[in-house]
Amino acid sequence: MDSYQRAAEFMMVEQKAKTKEYWDTFYSELPTGDEVNQFVTEGSTRTNNASGNETSDLEWIAPNSPELMDTILSLFPATDDSESDSKDPNETTKKRCDPKAAHVLEIGCGVSQLSLSLLQRLLYQNQEAADRVHMRAYDFVSTDVSSVCIEQNRIRDDAFIASIHATDGSLSYELLDVLNQKSSSRTYDVILDKGTLDTFLFRSKRTKKGSDSHPPLLTPLLNNIHGWLRSGCKAKYIIISPRSKIRSVRDFRGFTSVRRIKFDVSSLGCDSVLVKSNNVKAARSTSEIYLYECTKNEYYNPDKDAPYSSFGCSI
């Protein structure tokens, strides 16, 4: 067993023993009512729910503006029409794709409304479209390790979820430990990450286990993400982060390509927030955030291949 594996296993034990309790307590103590204004200034952004009412939900990094939602949606894999004469080496796996529905997993959702906002945006676009014949449904599964925030989200979004027509899509909230591969047996076309990887990077630095270019804690995370991405569909792992460089993502062999997109948040009236393990705003605020579009490498085998390349993907 190498040093990466030993460190990763140790930190996975910590994830089970301490992290769940920490985040359950964190979300149980979220401010409400008049406390929201002060809390928002300390490192989060306030959001609006489906009815346009202000909520106390935390949106790390940047608010879910229509501009940001459109940029994220533009990175989703296109509908695969699978021509019969294609010479694509993955032709045999294309049948695994669902042409009528796209399946989206959000990891580490907290009390964010990212999945809800994306689905609302998609429903709006579908209503505006003249031709709805080839519209796909989008099934969102928003997950977190904290049962407290999952239950809060279910209660908060119950009315919206009930209003969604089955042919348009769905939204559900479920428990998921991203460091435990057995937590999910399903695969997805898209995996969304708005703050989870950043939190693990911060934790690795804080525990002095991130001195290397590739913190050990990220290896099981990225391997699980690779396993949960659907095969044969050019499945994407999309990260929203204030970090201009993420070496472990760049060098991970489980991605054939990693594309970085710069997004200006200055017009949104806020600064990006570096995710930490609490609500303290980063000392270094910036008007830019970054989206990372990571495409699954079908040929990577985590049981046989080294997780990182010394060359990395071009960004």
Image (cartoon, rainbow, N blue to C red):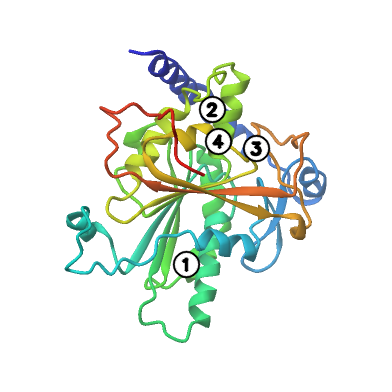
- Local crowd at mark 2 within 10 Å, few (<14), some, or many (≥20)? some
Q: Which amino acid does label 2 sit on?
A: Thr
Between circles 2 and 4, the one closer to the viewer is 4
Local SS, label 4 = loop
Read off the residue under disc 4. Answer: 246
Marks 3/2: CA–CA distance:
15 Å
Q: Position of residue 143 (x, y in %)?
A: 47, 46
Which numbered disc, 3 or 4, marks the residue that appears first in the sequence?
A: 4
- Local crowd at mark 1 within 10 Å, few (<14), some, or many (≥20)? few
Marks 1/4: CA–CA distance:
38 Å
Seen at 34% across and 26% down, the residue is: 306
Read off the residue under disc 2. Answer: 19
Between circles 3 and 1, the one closer to the viewer is 3
Q: Position of residue 264 (x, y in %)?
A: 70, 55
Q: Which amino acid does label 3 sit on?
A: Val
Marks 2/4: CA–CA distance:
23 Å
- In the image, 15: left or right of 94? right
Which numbered disc, 2 or 1, marks the residue that appears first in the sequence?
A: 2
Marks 2/1: CA–CA distance:
31 Å
- In the image, 182: left or right of 194? left
| Label disc, if present, on residue 42 of the rendered structure | none
Along the line of sight, which residue is nearer the eye, 224 or 49? 224
